[in-house]
Amino acid sequence: MDRAKVRLSDGTICLVEVNRASARKEVANRDEIFEFELVKKQIRKITEDWAETFKQLKPTKTVLEFGINLSIESGALTSVIVKGAGETNLKIILEWDNK
């Protein structure tokens, strides 16, 4: 893993690990600062889409858990949820009370 500087919405700069394959070329300039906004939008949209599905199922409890890997593509920080040969990091728990 390589590291990249990322600016959060309040201006704070932090280091994040990014996939080496994508970072090797893109993070050549270690002083470049990437914006986190695109990753936040991706996470928000994924969550909203799943929430819409959960509303239709009407469980009493819902847990959506997913992990993301960060990569740099076309000069922008982005999130990767599904990678490789169909591997994914997504866990969904739906519960219904029998009341």
Image: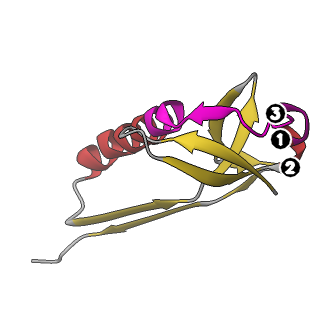
Expressed as whole percent of the image width and height from the top left, the position of residue 92 reads 46, 62
The C terminus: image quadrant: bottom left
Q: Which residue is mark 2?
A: 20
Which residue extends farthest top?
A: 74
Mark carried by residue 29: 3
Of callouts 2 and 3, the N-terminal one: 2
What is the magenta range?
A: 24-42
Whether residue 85 can be seen here: no
Mark carried by residue 79: none
Whether residue 62 can be seen here: yes
Amino acid, disc 1: Ala
**Residue 11 falls left or right of residue 71:** left
Contact? badges 1 and 3 (CB < 8 Å) = no
- Indicate yes or no whether the magenta region holds residue 41: yes
Which residue extends farthest bottom?
A: 98
**Neighbour tally class for label 1: few under 14, some 14-19, many 20 plus, Cα within 10 Å:** many
Q: Nearer the viewer, mark 1 or mark 3?
A: 3
Contact? badges 1 and 2 (CB < 8 Å) = yes
**Neighbour tally class for label 3: few under 14, some 14-19, many 20 plus, Cα within 10 Å:** few
Q: Nearer the viewer, residue 88 or 60?
A: 88
Of callouts 1 and 3, the N-terminal one: 1
